[in-house]
Image (cartoon, rainbow, N blue to C red):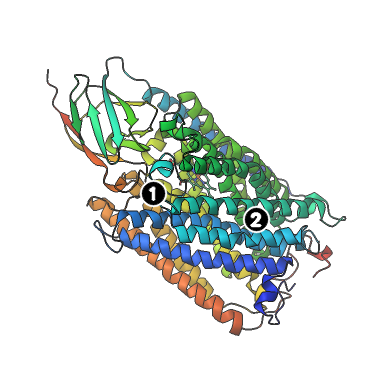
Amino acid sequence: MVLELQKPRPIWQIMFSTHHTDVGLLYLITSLAFLFLGGSLALVIRAELFLPGAQIIGDAMTFNRIFTVHGTTLIFLFIIPFASAVGNYYVPIMVRYKDMAYPKLNAIAFWMIPPGGALIWLGFADFTWYATPPYSIISAPGPAADMWIFGLKILGISSVLGAINFIVTILKCKHPDMSIGQVPLLAWSFLSSSLIILVAIPTFAAALLMLLTDRLGVSGFFNPAMGGDPIAYAHLFWFTFHPEVYVLVIPAIGMMYEIIPRFSRKPIYSYNSGIFAFVLLSIVGFSSWAHHMYATGMSFTEKTVFMVGTLAAVPASAMHVFNFIATMWNGRIKFLTPMMWSVGGIALFFSAGAGGVANAAMPLDFTTHDTYWVVGHFHLFVMGTIAFGSIGFLYYMFPYVTGRMYNETLGKVHFIMSFVGTVLVFFTQHVLGLYGMPRRIFDYPPIPEWIAMNQIATVGAMIIGISMAIFLANMIYSSGKGKLANTEDPFGVGGKYYYPFEAKNPSH
Amino acid sequence: MGGHSNWPEWIYIGVIVAIMVWVGAEAWDAERLVEHVPEDAETIIVTGQQWFWTFEYEDGTKTIGDLYVEVGKAYKLEIVSKDVNHSFNIHDYVVLMDAIPGRVNTVWFAPTEVGTYDIQCREFCGLIHYNMRGTLIVEEAST
Ligand code: HEM
Ligand SMILES: [Cu+2]
């Protein structure tokens, strides 16, 4: 299965193409570019926090802009487009269709990403990734803030268009011989996350417009000075973005469902439980959004309702962990780079979930909320689970995309350094949160515990940074000079468990 | 799939659900107690604004930055904001409540030891958010 042709083509042929593997390639390269851009900002933040006092950034405004663009970039310009890249390459093949359902729409959805990204990077807003009013209305400087709003608007539309395309491709274009209960779990993950997008995003799209008109002074939805209420924004925002965290994580889990059985040389333990967990999460995920708002003054009853909603979603996540471990159990596991990333990702997924349960328990959240604990919590997901799953999958796709093998030793070095770095940064940040350090601060008082833990986190981040440089070098070198891959079975694990329905796939 | 029975997974799910029920019940019970404001609590109005805290006591006096309380007494804090969102936090006493313009949020606490403790803002509020700090001063009871 060669997904991408090896013979060189002029760049414009790929850029103007609507073929799913070409659009996939565009998504892939764009998302990786933003991974490195956004990641560099993280290193700047960590360097600044190495010691109290101003280190390398002169002022708080610049610091605020940097962490805002860091978060926005990695969520909207790395994680989401990377998932779209994988979906573009694999979903049509998995449902045995010649392309995405709407190829032109597919290309349009991709081409909305560069302008969206440009608005965010050229503006460099400072109001954090949730643009909370009234700060974002009365205090945040324009045009950066307005550019961010437009950028997010464009990216939101792009992901809705992408979602429609995945849903139609899977439900309507799958091969008639194939029932929905035979579609591989990776494709199922795209179906579930796309359905969440369709339901969740419009709410934030509306909130963004309201925010914009509030900024223009023609409305006062969220501006108390004009009779509005900032809490309304918080509800609209989290109604979109709590489900959206599952949009981010579900495709990464799907990628692990592709890798783990293959490298364990065993079929997936329970295909049905994988589907069940995806669908359950997509539904229950909508009942927990206000767990981000315990400290906004909600009543006891409201808090209880959202705590129950949050805890109810945990079994659905935990089922995947079981499924992965049961699949590996007694398998003849071959620990090549993609497998290492997946297994590491599962371990961090589990730790992240355990921390999430603590956040959800209302009295504990008053200790952790808006401290570094929360930063540690969600980075164990976005970095530890999603980026790990994605990077592992990138190594896995690499021979199919380029026809060549990456350097296995460097791949393993990359994994080990990133894993150690991730543990150092984000576990430490949990503890730092328990010591009370608020997030989003440019500088901090010289409390000895805070200094020590910030330094550990900074060292960890630098280790990740170095490993990412190794990764980049490996990708660039190997795509041109790596040894030719055996595209029938690049990892030497045998084709039998390629994926469960491979035998029927005519494109192999 | 493939015909093997799935009982280990059911047991596992059962255990997870049981843990969640336990966490939820404990949290519910603890929060219920924590939220019960004592009758005799003294009210202090806490105002957040970019980038400092003002405290107004029952006798009408005001302090900026430093909050004075007496050990062993209960205090009910009414938290308000003059501009953007802030979050009033005394980490050592697990006091955390957002200050949101247009709303009055309440939280209570009873200091147990004489001494000074850090007060900070835990919700992003702009330029000097990082230094929107203050001090809680717990003094001996006067009577
Ligand atoms: C076991 C499942 C999970 C539970 C129980 C859980 C619980 C929570 C809770 C209660 C908070 C609020 C913490 C606070 O602000 O005080 C939170 C924050 C967060 N969670 Fe999770 N979570 C889970 C899974 C995830 C996943 C899968 C992701 C992402 C892919 C994620 C991403 C986030 C993010 C981004 C935030 C913080 C947002 C912010 O304040 O900037 N969580 N989580
Ligand atoms: Cu959430």
Q: Please state if B3 lies on the left or on the right of A159 as rendered.
A: right
Instruction: Please tell me whether residue B57 is drawn above or below residue A452 in the rendered image.
Output: above
| Mark 2 neighbour class, 10 Å CA radius: few under 14, some 14 to 19, many 20 or more | many
Q: To which chain does the residue with label 1 belong?
A: A
Q: Please state if A230 lies on the left or on the right of A272 as rendered.
A: left
Q: Amino acid at mark 1?
A: His
Residue A33 placed where, x, y %? 53, 68
- What residue occupies the far right of the structure in this picture? A177
Q: What residue appears at the point 64 percent right and 79 percent down from the top-left corner?
A: A404
Report whether residue B5 is seen: yes
According to the picture, the residue beneath numbered tag 2 turns out to be A254
Q: Nearer the viewer, residue B140 or A113?
A: A113
Q: Nearer the viewer, residue A153 or B11?
A: A153
User: Same chain for the residues at labels 1 and 2, yes or no?
Assistant: yes
Q: Nearer the viewer, residue B103 or A195?
A: B103
Q: Nearer the viewer, residue A265 or A260?
A: A260
Q: Please state if A400 lies on the left or on the right of A179 as rendered.
A: left
Q: What residue appears at the point 35 percent right and 64 percent down from the top-left corner?
A: A459
Asked where in the image residue B117 lies, by quadrant, the reply is top left
Q: Please state if B81 lies on the left or on the right of A332 as rendered.
A: left
The yes-or-no answer for disc 2 within 8 Å of ligand 1 is no
Residue A26 placed where, x, y %? 63, 68
Instruction: Please tell me whether residue A328 is drawn above or below residue A371 in the rendered image.
Output: below
Q: What residue appears at the point 44 percent right and 25 percent down from the top-left corner?
A: B29
Q: To which chain does the residue with label 2 belong?
A: A
Q: Secondary structure at mark 2?
A: helix
According to the picture, the residue beneath numbered tag 1 turns out to be A430
The quadrant of the picture occupied by the C terminus of chain A is bottom right
Asked where in the image residue A20 lies, by quadrant, the reply is bottom right
Give the Cα separation between the discs numbered 1 and 2: 27 Å
- What residue occupies the far top of the structure in this picture? B39
Q: Amino acid at mark 2?
A: Gly
